[in-house]
Amino acid sequence: GVIWYRPTELQQLLAFKKEHKEAAKIVVGNTEVGVEVKFKHFDYKYLVNPSQINALNQIDVLRDGIKIGSAVTLSDIQIFLQKQINELPESENRIYKSIVEMLHWFAGMQVRNVASIGGNIMTASPISDLIPILMAANAKLEVESLDGGRRKIKIDENFFTGYRRNIIDSSEVLISV
């Protein structure tokens, strides 16, 4: 009874999310959705996998940090950050080291190979592995919807609005961190 949708362009994802914002669940790694369906008896009409959208799978080095697409796997982030750690001076890689160390302890390799940074953030879990580090780093999220356009959100004390809830609107898609 579930429809699986796999867009290849960001605009396709945004249009689908607008049309089915409450009924569509974005899935990359699936850990949380598996728990929700099996144990909490959630019933999603649409599961959307954005892993073929290039904009969500890029890691870009910026002047003042890095920009990680929301569908980039935790394993790919770990590999990328380890390279940055080896190339950058100590004063510029402390946050990267913290993330790599946390990812070492995060689940098993099988999970890290499919789980995404976006999933870690969007589940809004109070025991999220990466949120405390991202908060300490003053990380910003880029979110987008067809009607609201693109905006930036800071991960701070106002990000969570309740248990497993955050300030990102149900029509918005997390683009990058």
Image: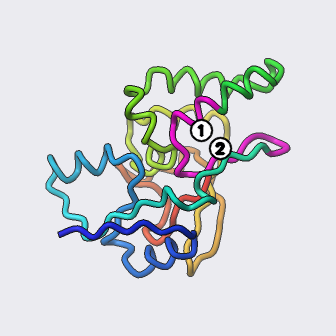
> Residue 133, image x and y in percent?
58, 32
Report crowding for label 2: few under 14, some 14 to 19, many 20 or more residues within 10 A (C-alpha). Answer: some
Q: Residue at x 75, y 20 (%)?
A: 86
The residue type indicated by label 1 comes to Met
Near mark 1 (Cα within 10 A), the count class, few <14, some 14-19 or many ≥20, is: some
Residue 24 picture location, percent across and down: 34, 68
Q: Which of the numbered marks, if any, corresponds to residue 139?
A: 2
Against 124, residue 21 (above or below) is below
Instruction: Kindly identify which residue carries mark 1.
Output: 135
Q: Secondary structure at mark 2?
A: loop
- Image coordinates of residue 149 in percent, x first then y, are 63, 75
Q: Is residue 84 above or below residue 5?
A: above
The answer to which image quadrant residue 105 occupies is top left
Report the magenta residues as a range: 62-79
Q: Is residue 48 above or below residue 18?
A: above
Residue at 73 percent across and 42 percent down: it is 66
Q: Is residue 70 magenta?
A: yes
> Is residue 123 rendered magenta in the image?
no
Q: CA distance from mark 2 to mark 1?
A: 6 Å
Instruction: Name the quadrant of the N terminus.
Output: bottom left
Residue 172, image x, y percentages: 51, 68
Q: Residue at x 15, y 49 (%)?
A: 38
Residue at the spot x=59%, y=52% of the render? 57
Disc tally is 2
Of the residues shown, which amino acid type is indicated by label 2?
A: Ala
Q: Is residue 30 left or right of residue 147?
A: left
Relative to 57, does residue 53 appear above or below in the rendering?
below
Contact (CB < 8 A) between labels 2 and 1? yes
